[in-house]
Image: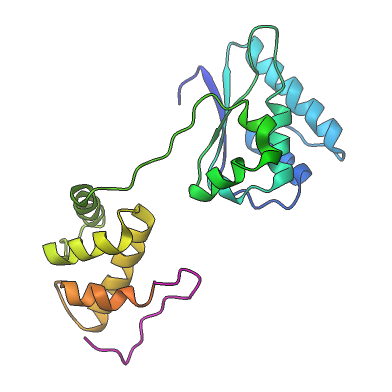
Amino acid sequence: DNPDYTTAFIVNPKQTSETAFLKAICTEFGVPTRRSQRETEYELRAFLFEQVEKGKNVVLFVDEAQQLRGPMFEQIRQILNYETDDRKLLNVVLAGQIELRYKLADQSKRALVSRIAVSSTLDALTLEETQSMIEFRCHIGKIENPFTQEAVESIYNFSKGVPREVIKLCAMSVQYAILNELKNIPKELVEMAQNDIVKPDEINVPKTVNKF
């Protein structure tokens, strides 16, 4: 909402080519796209110069950036080359899972990595932070926290404090609690739910015959 900034947000970059990715960026900024990639790049560059003349800082946010493919990283590198004598025309923020770091470590990304000003990796949650996150999400969902302290500790030990894994295990545990008509979720039920999410590539569906 800051009037000094013009922003665009790519939520889930699943485009299959650098041209499609470039056009998605332009669409988010409200820039018209053209048939060819070069003409589309001209449109984006003109837009960026126009924003700078207005005193704007232009920022592109890309979430789930670990889904980016090689040519798309190269497209980001190319548009980062847009600059005046004293400033870059575009700032890019890439946010993603740990696979993003692995992709950027590839030798083919050296030119892009050299343009990264700041990088940061979020640490896993502590046990206390895991407890707070669960309580906060229950509060937002307007339900009483059903997890016992021992259950939270089991969730933490299994997830190693990774928020996405915490959420997956909590969701599966709640499904088992509903199946078993339980108001509170004990450690044993969490351990049962763990069996369904050991392999992330499997579909996690509670077995209706597996009563607690």
Quarter placement of the C terminus: bottom left
In which quadrant of the rendered view does residue 88 lie? top right
Q: Main secondary structure of the magenta part?
A: loop
Residue farthest to the bottom? Answer: 209
Between 6 and 41, the residue placed more toward the observer is 41
Picture coordinates of residue 5, whole percent (x, y): 53, 21
Way the structure is coloured: rainbow
Q: Which residues are magenta?
A: 198-212
Q: Is residue 156 above or below residue 97?
A: below
Residue at image location 25% in from the left, 61% down from the top: 157
Quarter placement of the N terminus: top left
Q: Is residue 148 visible?
A: no
In the picture, measured across the screen, residue 152 lies left or right of residue 16, that is left
In the picture, measured across the screen, residue 83 lies left or right of residue 41, that is left
In the picture, measured across the screen, residue 164 lies left or right of residue 34, that is left
Between 88 and 40, the residue placed more toward the observer is 88
Picture coordinates of residue 123, whole percent (x, y): 34, 43
Picture coordinates of residue 8, whole percent (x, y): 58, 34
Residue at image location 17% in from the left, 65% down from the top: 147
Residue farthest to the front? Answer: 107
Residue at image location 75% in from the left, 23% down from the top: 45
Q: Is residue 98 above or below residue 155?
A: above
Picture coordinates of residue 181, whole percent (x, y): 19, 82
In the picture, measured across the screen, residue 163 lies left or right of residue 157, that is right
Residue 21 on the magenta segment? no
Residue at image location 36% in from the left, 64% down from the top: 168
Q: Is residue 196 visible?
A: yes
